[in-house]
Amino acid sequence: MCLAIPAKIVSLEGDRAVVEAIGNRWNARTTLLAQAKVGDIVLVHAGFAICTVDPQEAKQTWELVARMFQDQPADG
């Protein structure tokens, strides 16, 4: 299953960003979003930021994802 997650851009160099969501950071490419900037919240899928996201919508998604995984055992 593939899942697109909203994440905040915390650093950006060229088309390479470090994004953060739900306490995790990872790399994403902003090739599809030429105007992306630090502080933007973007939807990340398969390592690419594919669109910007409303901050309130992102917050709701983060809360839903957190609830989905709160009862999961630590080893998956």
Image (cartoon, rainbow, N blue to C red):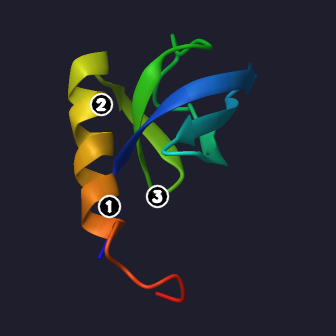
Q: Residue 19's image quarter?
A: top right
Judge the density around disc 2: few (<14), some (14-19), many (≥20) Cα neighbours within 10 Å. many
Q: Secondary structure at mark 3?
A: loop
Q: CA separation, marks 3 and 1?
A: 8 Å
Q: Can you tell which of label 2 and label 3 is closer to the viewer?
A: 2
The residue at which mark 2 appears reads as: 58
Residue 15 coordinates in the image, percent (x, y): 67, 29
Amino acid type, label 3: Ala
Q: Which mark is residue 3?
A: 1
Sequence-wise first label, 3 or 1 = 1
Disc 3 crowd, CA 10 A, few/some/many (<14, 14-19, 20+): few
Residue of label 3:
46
Asked which quadrant contains residue 61, the reply is: top left
User: Which residue is at a point 52% across and 17% down the rendered structure image?
Assistant: 34
Q: Is residue 60 visible?
A: yes
Q: Element at badge 1?
A: loop
